[in-house]
Image (tube, helix red, strand yellow):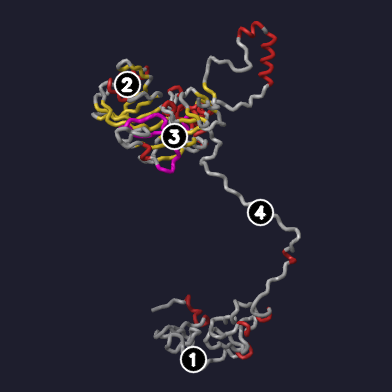
Amino acid sequence: MPERPSATPLDPEADAPGTMTSGEAEANPAAAEGVQAAEAAEPNDAPKQERIAKVIARAGVASRRQAEALIEEGRVKVNGEMLLTPAFTVSADDAITVDGAPLPTKLRTRAFLFHKPRGLVTTNHDPDGRPTIFDSLPSSLPRVVTVGRLDINTEGLLIVTNDGGLARILELPATGWTRKYRVRVHGAVDEAALKDLREGTAVDGVLYGPIEAKVDRAGDNSWLTVSLTEGKNREIKVVLGALGLQVTRLIRVSFGPFQLGDLPRGEVKEIPTRLLKDQLGPRLTAEAEADFDSPVTASSPRATPRRKPRDSGGPRREERPNRPRDGGDRQRGRSFGDGERPRFGGRGDDRGDRDRGGRDRDGGRNFGDRPAQRFDRREDRDDRSAPRGDRQRFGGRGDDRGGRDRDGGRSFGDRPPQRFDRREDRDDRSAPRGD
């Protein structure tokens, strides 16, 4: 007989150990008070027990219903023992495997907005071989489940999350989040009949909750905005079809506080953790048991190398001997390798033959093979104001670089010199010029 797993099966008729029934408590009140005092004094160190299907769904492996089917197929094991019933509770200390693989590490609760295109089925596997939304999602996303479903011809906003518990809470009508759609219909629109949908309606014996519908644009193909809080299968198409309207296009534009916006078709955008936590609020966060403190990825911490302790007996930095240098002592300069020191410019001018001013010993500056350029001393240039003889004039036509020729006029190339009278010769500027 196989050994039973250490996890606890559900037995609602069994009493907890150390407890008393109501009849026993009435027969012996003193004993009942002692049991209550012992229960109050005993610390509650037992790990939290949860249903196995809920744990599998929160890990993102499957939904709760799918997890129950996996258990009935014998594909789930707890502590190495096959589980045969979903009426089983486990704790964090139990080892759970599905198809021989352990459950993924519990990660931070994340949610993503996905703009679903038409032609994709909202399922993990389609028996007819049609493409699914999971075939279109990027591979960088973790394993996710959908919040509700959209028909194959319905497009727009679809929320996916890595937390199965959160997906379950958000898709419940009791949550009260409104789904809003843009609907294109063909047929005559009766606005009075649309207003009656606010009180709810029944179609073929199926009751549907309140629906808010208003006309955005009337015509042969009218556009409506439809809002509802529950999402039964093909609800909008069935209800509007009962009013004689044929739905030709259906786009979900919002789900609760999250909007489709300008998200491109087929693209995914993550909801920031702070925004998701604020929109859920304390109540929904507690009901979904969302985890916003765990790491985002299951990466193992980096191993930090330990620093070697310093040897107290070794020489300190200032006591260490200087490294020997090749190429002679410091008077001859630094050595570059074992060869002869390269010369500046590579043409034979030794850097050591210069003084600190950059001049060679004979007074000129040497640049490679260029001849040294010499400058006269200041005392040899005292006659700078003296005329320089037959020096070539500025402009090449006889005018010197000073800008004026010898007879007092300024010459510009071949133009004749322009003469200006002196100030004392122009005192009669205010006199009438006559003819």
Residue 108 is at least partly visible in this image: yes
| Mark 4 neighbour density, 10 Å: few (under 14) some (14–19) many (20 or more) | few
Q: Which residue is mark 1?
A: 391
Residue 278 visible to the viewer: no
**In the figure, 297 relative to 64: above or below?**
below
- The residue singled out by tag 3 in the image is 99
> Which element is circle 2 on?
helix
Instruction: Tell me whether the residue at label 2 lies in contact with that at label 4, contact meaning CB atoms closer than 8 angstroms.
Output: no
- The answer for how far apart the CA atoms under marks 3 and 2 are is 50 Å
Q: Which residue is mark 4?
A: 307
Looking at the rendered image, the disc whose residue lies closer to the viewer, 4 or 1, is: 4
Type of the residue with mark 2: Leu
Query: 113 or 43: which is nearer to us?
Result: 43
Q: Earlier in the sequence, mark 3 or mark 4?
A: 3
Asked whether 310 or 280 is in front, the reply is 310
Q: Secondary structure at mark 4?
A: loop
Q: Label 3 vs label 4: CA separation? A: 44 Å
| Front tag of 3 and 4 | 3
Distance from label 2 to label 4 (Cα)? 75 Å
Say which label, 1 or 3, has the lower sequence index: 3
Amino acid under label 4?
Arg
Q: Is residue 376 left or right of residue 177?
A: right
